[in-house]
Image (cartoon, rainbow, N blue to C red):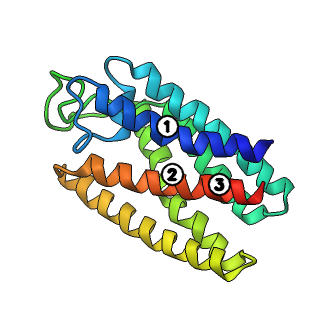
Amino acid sequence: MLLWVGVGGALLFPAVFLLDGWLRNGYSSLRHTVSALATGSRSWLQTCNFILCGTAVALGAAGLAFSGFFLFAAAVGVFGLGLVLSGIFPMDPMRGYPPGTDQKDPDEFSTAHRLHDIAGAVVFLVMPAMPAVVFFTGESWPTRLTAAAVAVGLIAGVAGFTRAWEKDGALTGLVQKLTLTLACLWLAASFALAA
């Protein structure tokens, strides 16, 4: 049951941020990050998305541990906890969102924003670690090779997002969303295969 809860959380997380971002006035899905959705109108929706889906993923990690996948469970649990903390500590309004916000970064960041940055760094660092663990500990070659391909894709995605974020690139949000969606879809499939 816990593994299927994990499947639900991993699938719901990108579904909510993609749909909400598409429907949100003044929000650019190409430029703005997922975390920006936790500011402005309907901020509660992305906050709940972070916390509820992160909790579901962490419960799925417990299911992996009960199934004997201890190292993989640890990495997934860190990912889930990072999502939860990203919801508890929202980022500051910046870079033109919510509408009317300065296009630049603020001169000083709030404590919540700084904690959000730490939680986000954990999420993005552990994303490629999850499939890397499966590559080294997986039981079948198809599973291991798929995990290796996903790990390479996530490393490229995290690196691309980091560069885009630092430059406030026009496609920062797109790169981030593609990377998160790849991680979540692979994680949902991994939970389902372990169930």
Q: Which residue in the structure is indicated by mark 1?
A: 86
Q: Position of residue 4 (x, y in %)?
A: 72, 44
Instruction: Choose the circle earlier in sequence order: 3 or 2.
Output: 3
Instruction: Choose the circle earlier in sequence order: 3 or 1.
Output: 3
In the image, residue 136 sits, relative to residue 1, either above or below, namely: below
For discs 3 and 2, the disc positioned in front in the rendered view: 3
Mark 2 crowd level (few <14, some 14–19, many ≥20, 10 Å Cα) = many
Q: Which residue in the structure is indicated by mark 3?
A: 76
Residue 123 image label: 2
On-image quarter of the N terminus: top right
Residue shown at the point (67%, 79%) measured from the top left? 136
For discs 3 and 1, the disc positioned in front in the rendered view: 3
Of residues 164 and 135, the one drawn nearer to the viewer in this rendering = 135
Q: Quadrant of residue 97?
A: top left
Q: Position of residue 141 (x, y in %)?
A: 67, 82
Disc 2 and disc 1 in contact, CB within 8 angstroms? yes
> Which amino acid type is marked by label 3?
Val
Q: Is residue 3 left or right of residue 158?
A: right
Q: Position of residue 19 (x, y in %)?
A: 38, 33
> Which amino acid type is marked by label 2?
Val
Disc 3 and disc 1 in contact, CB within 8 angstroms? no
Q: Is residue 191 left or right of residue 63?
A: left
